[in-house]
Amino acid sequence: MLMALLLAAGGTMAQKAVSIETLLREMVDRDARAQYPDPAFSCRQFSSYDRATTTPDQPGWFGNADFNQYLRVEIRDGRTESVMMDADGPGAIVRFWMTFAGAGAPEGILRIYIDDDPTPVVEGPAWDVLSGKLIVDGVLAAGVSKLTPREQRGHNLFFPIPYARRCKVTYEARAEGLAVFYNINYRTYAAGTPVVSFSQAQLRRNAALTAKVQRQLERKERGIERMKLSRLALDASLAPGERRSVRIVGSHAIEALNLRLKAAHMEQALRSTVLEIAFDGRRTVWAPLGDFFCIGYRPLYSSTWYTQTSADGDLGCYWVMPFRDSCTITLHNLGEQPVELADASASYKKWNWTDRSMHFGASWRQLTHIDTGARMQEADGLFAQDINFATLRGRGVYVGDGVVLCNTASTWWGEGDEKVFVDGETHPSHIGTGTEDYYCYAWGRPEPFTGHPFVSQADGSGNLVGGYAVNTRLRALDEIPFTTGLKFDLELWHWAHTVMNYAPISFWYLTPGGESAIEPDVAGAREPVAFTRADIYPPRLKLYIECEDMTVETITDGYAEIQSGLRRENSDVPMWSGGSQLYWNGAKTGDALTASIESDYDGSLKMLLLLTVAPDYGTFDISFNGKAVAHVDLNYPRIATREIALGEVELRQGRNTITVRSARLPEGRSVSCFGLDRITLYR
């Protein structure tokens, strides 16, 4: 009995404590991604998500009040601290993201308390903590994109903050009327797991290692050139419908996949040339080349810890992909043009397969011509739906995802939040605050960022004006382990009712016997790629009415005028179509405004309203020719425009009226404003 106790104690003593050092080393240990975590942990998220998000059968499931939501408020030493996170250890914060709306928000003070010590180990302005120099200066504390004005960036801290017993994070606002958005991903280890808690002394002790790891991540120093690797050529010239397969036998791990794609129509080739990989007789990878390498179907430069691409068609992947007995790599040409794969190879090494080893996987599909207003639950007068990125069964780890899309409306497409269900959860342990927040930037900004090791927006040009966009998040310490299964959904919550192409890809590891529910989408890979609205919407009858040209017939209170001159934030682009809008100020609950237009057309047409949203705008009921057509909440933390789909209306020859009635005032205000920018009628 004594010997057994000594052996048990020795085993505990042999387990190295989780610390800043071990977590930093794990971050750049590519082999670690391909092995089930030891010590085991769960990964969850605190965030400012709308607390009305409870169950899918309740209206709040797609709630969008994703700011200023805290666990509680505490008064400490005379100051008010809002609690963002409070978690028992042993654990570690592994990703911390924030953005703000309102002057003075970044100057609010973040505090991180460890192990019930009343003195915070970190204290300072939010920007300085997350993307400044207060903890770390470099790629692990980054605001993206650097091309975006600082106040509109997503501010990210990827530096690990371990804690032995407990961690609490608070925010002290230093101004009124702020909107604070946050996501905090954290690990929780099994009870008894030794952890060396974060401290300023530990931070100083690991300064040299921190600098080394940041240099590796920033320069993408993966160490492959120092490895003894075998190389299997993948070069091929593939005619339409042709494929090529190669096989590796034995217990090995692929360290790198590299190739140069050549074709007359490179964009279509990136989508219609498909990579398939089967490990130990089971297919786990099936994805178009461009999506697999995280640039979609446009040749672009991008550089992450796991992928490297160029605008000339060079594609590189650096996920470690082990297998016990064999691996078969197949390249398919599903397009209608010949493609060439040059300088193509799989580089691999010997691998000691154990019960912790996992097969790499990637699942992809395209929702072609998806209707953003169909089969959806109403949210704030608009619509949303959950898109399944991954449904996995078995034991494994979720390590990343991306989405490639063609946006067909001149407004933001990504208001939706991620929802991650782990091991049969009935309520997701990860709920976010917006698609751009999940991908680590903010406010739907279009500026690209391509050099961060874990996140990328290689092209965001279609975010706000319509067109192409691609977002990627590849996980390191924020990977999500599961023992029986995982479901990852991301809301498609578009500000317009439109039709678009939307193609998600997910990356994961599974132990043998695990399965992905998403099957190969051959039709989606063959679909012609789309870059503009005209590629999805054929030209059709469309009538535009600039609302400043309408006649105001009656108004019960307040005043109406033509408002103009306002520009979009940090740009010279006018806020409104035609530069002006019909503006109504001073509306109280029940007040109404009626305006009219003259038409030579008689018949049924679909209608879109381009409306203004702002902090002093309220909720309104809208009717057209006496028929109720919409109930819209136009209150929003900042001024912007939103497109509202009304369905079909009856337009009659001669005079037509639109009536707007104030239904609810903005919180804390005695009157409301309303702005009508443009009416679109089409069939």
Image (cartoon, rainbow, N blue to C red):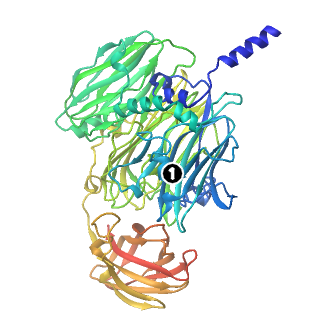
Is residue 491 at all visible to an observer of this figure? no
Q: Mark 1: which secondary structure?
A: loop
* Neighbour tally class for label 1: few under 14, some 14-19, many 20 plus, Cα within 10 Å: many
Quarter of the image where one finds residue 213:
top left
Front-most of residues 607 and 136: 136
Amino acid, disc 1: Asp
Quarter in which the N terminus is drawn: top right
Vertical comparison of 191 with 668: above or below: above
**Considering depth in this image, is 303 or 270 the residue closer to the camera?**
303
Quarter residue 678 falls in: bottom left
User: 60 above or below 268?
Assistant: below
Residue shown at 57%/32% (left/top)?
A: 481
Q: Is residue 31 left or right of residue 172?
A: left
Q: Position of residue 146 (x, y in %)?
A: 34, 49
Q: Which residue is mark 1?
A: 417
- Percent across and percent down for residue 427 are 63, 46
Name the spot of residue 48 as percent of width and height, x first: 57, 54
Residue nearest the viewer, comparing 143 with 309: 143
The C terminus is located in which quarter?
Answer: bottom left
Q: Residue at x 78, y 13 (%)?
A: 5
